[in-house]
């Protein structure tokens, strides 16, 4: 290795010696020995200050002997390759090289000491970090004499005693779906292929308005959209707030009319000065539309999923309802487990951590809904609901995650590659995309670790449920109450829902056939 051998004059090396050295180098690359791989540890003095359940302030002191050792290694490597005017490469005096390259070498030594020091602290100390170290690099100085000291902040998993998770008592929602349930769900299926027809008369609940939408604080315009297509439901949900009684506000509205409402913004709104404030929403209605359902013909049966008969379609609809019931059972169980296991989890989680993790919690929830066959309308409504109380929802989710993670570690639960493939296939199936496209999107957005956590947490929940006691309770499906739009007071934001596209890059359905609470479909038959 370069830090343990002198650099010889290349001209004095014979061809045989060069071949020997080349073979030796190849052997080192192929099978480095344990001694060669061993790196001498730093002799660190580490002080860890606890500044909260998840916050640690760490001070590290590196003694002069380690600093000198790193300088020695850098200069030894440099002597053999440094180009100094008046000298052949590798022949300049070491003192001259040390003087000429001191600044550059000092920066490299400082960087290497910091990286190796932080790595050694994370290996030696029982910290369980959950974020990258917050280190102000420019504030660190490498002194000419004496030790080097640096400080950094680190967010860590809180320390806690694992609660008793075996033998929990869990309510399990159950339902035998009736013909009426299938009829209602079938209407949602047909609405997916429906057409929006201009309506001359007044609007009612369930109709659509095409409208300009402006949010205002007094006379100040906060955001504006030239066109929003909104279904009239009891609640209008947007990213940082909602309007209750939206169906009453729009009752009897016609094209050309303006309706004004008060919108309550959440405490988690992106614009701090607007949090918890009531602002004005102005709807300039351009047109009213009504959804006209298609006739269930043989052609439409085939288009929906290659079905040969209405009876076969109804069986598929019932299957879809049962799958969604499975999601409700899983979600209900998860909520009950979380409530029971986090009773003593009174950790004070830092707001910065909650804000950073908030988006990941929304991504996790969206993926969970996608794999369970929920429509984009339903997912968007849930996404907006999560964002409206982002700090509270994220705090609850993080506490849940920390406990599930500890159980996974103790029970040695890890995802297999087949688990990733199965999850991606489900998301692809329910969002009408190819598995290849879904995987590419997950990787591009850096969400494979979100998927990993989701797989592990589901396995932990399954383990807990395998040792739980159940009591069956009736389940009543809830209709869609809220209409969700991507508009926010601070402006439109990108949804976490990947847009369904065909391989040619076009949307699979025409714009006029907007879904109205539809479910996604099982594989075509």
Image (cartoon, helix red, strand yellow):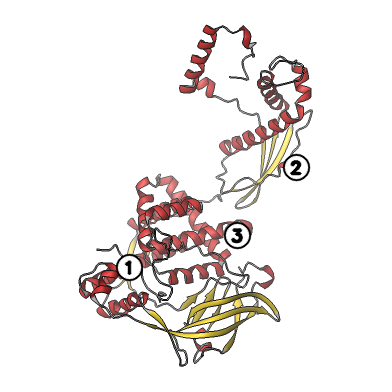
Residue for badge 2: 139
- Percent coordinates x, y for residue 49 in the rendering: 67, 45
Q: Quadrant of the N terminus?
A: top right
- Percent coordinates x, y for residue 73 in the rendering: 66, 22
Q: Is residue 515 above or below residue 37?
A: below
- Percent coordinates x, y for residue 491 in the rendering: 61, 70
Residue at horizontal 43 percent and vertical 48 percent from the top: 408
Which secondary structure, mark 1? strand
The answer for how far apart the CA atoms under marks 2 and 1 are is 59 Å
The answer for how far apart the CA atoms under marks 3 and 2 are is 26 Å
**Most foreground residue, 216 or 121:** 216
Residue 176 visible within the image: no
Label 1 Cα crowd, 10 Å radius (few <14 / some 14-19 / many 20+): few
Residue for badge 1: 471
Q: Earlier in the sequence, mark 2 or mark 1?
A: 2
Which secondary structure, mark 2? helix
Residue at horizontal 76 percent and vertical 30 percent from the top: 103
Residue for badge 3: 355
Which secondary structure, mark 3? helix
Q: Is residue 371 above or below residue 254?
A: above
């Amino acid at each position: 290795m370069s830090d343990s051998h002198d650099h010889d004059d290349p001209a004095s090396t014979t061809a045989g010696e060069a071949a020997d050295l080349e073979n030796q180098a190849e052997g080192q690359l192929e099978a480095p020995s344990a001694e060669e791989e061993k790196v001498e540890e730093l002799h660190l003095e580490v002080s860890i200050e606890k500044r909260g359940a998840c916050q640690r302030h760490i001070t590290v002191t590196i003694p002069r002997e380690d600093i000198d050792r790193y300088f020695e290694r850098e200069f030894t490597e440099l002597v053999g390759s440094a180009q100094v005017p008046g000298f052949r490469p590798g022949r300049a005096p070491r003192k001259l090289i040390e003087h000429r390259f001191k600044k550059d070498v000092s920066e490299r030594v400082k960087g290497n000491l910091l990286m190796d020091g932080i790595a050694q602290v994370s290996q030696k100390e029982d910290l369980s970090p959950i974020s990258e170290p917050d280190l102000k690099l420019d504030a660190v100085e490498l002194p000419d004499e004496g030790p080097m000291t640096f400080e950094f902040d680190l967010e860590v998993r809180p320390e806690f005693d694992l609660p008793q998770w075996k033998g929990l008592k869990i309510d399990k929602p159950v339902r035998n779906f009736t013909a009426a349930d299938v009829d209602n769900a079938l209407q949602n299926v047909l609405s997916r292929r429906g057409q929006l027809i201009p309506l001359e008369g007044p609007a009612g609940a369930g109709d659509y308005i095409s409208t300009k939408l402006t949010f205002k604080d007094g006379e100040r315009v906060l955001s504006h959209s030239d066109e929003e297509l909104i279904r009239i439901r009891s609640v209008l949900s947007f990213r940082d707030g909602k309007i209750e009684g939206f169906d009453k506000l729009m009752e009897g509205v016609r094209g050309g009319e303006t309706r004004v409402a008060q919108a309550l913004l959440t405490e988690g709104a992106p614009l701090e000065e607007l949090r918890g404030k009531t602002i004005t929403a102005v709807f300039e209605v351009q047109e009213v539309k009504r959804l006209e359902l298609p006739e269930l013909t043989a052609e439409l049966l085939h288009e929906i999923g290659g079905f040969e008969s209405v009876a076969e379609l109804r069986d598929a609809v019932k299957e879809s309802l049962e799958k969604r019931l499975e999601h409700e059972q899983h979600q209900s169980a998860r909520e009950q487990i979380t409530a029971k296991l986090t009773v003593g989890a009174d950790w004070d989680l830092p707001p910065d951590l909650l804000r950073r993790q908030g988006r990941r919690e929304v991504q996790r929830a969206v993926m969970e809904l996608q794999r369970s066959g929920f429509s984009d309308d339903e997912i968007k409504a849930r996404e907006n609901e999560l964002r409206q109380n982002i700090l509270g929802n994220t705090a609850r989710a993080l506490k849940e995650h920390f406990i599930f993670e500890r159980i996974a570690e103790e029970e040695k639960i890890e995802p297999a590659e087949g688990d990733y493939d199965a999850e991606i296939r489900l998301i692809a199936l329910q969002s009408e995309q190819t598995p290849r496209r879904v995987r590419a999107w997950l990787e591009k957005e850096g969400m494979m670790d979100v998927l990993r956590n989701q797989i592990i947490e589901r396995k932990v929940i399954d383990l807990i449920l395998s040792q739980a006691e159940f009591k069956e309770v009736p389940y009543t499906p809830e209709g869609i109450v809220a209409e969700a739009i991507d508009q926010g007071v601070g402006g439109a934001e990108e949804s976490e829902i990947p847009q369904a596209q065909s391989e040619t890059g076009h949307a699979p359905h025409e714009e006029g056939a907007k879904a109205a609470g539809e479910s996604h479909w099982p594989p075509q038959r």
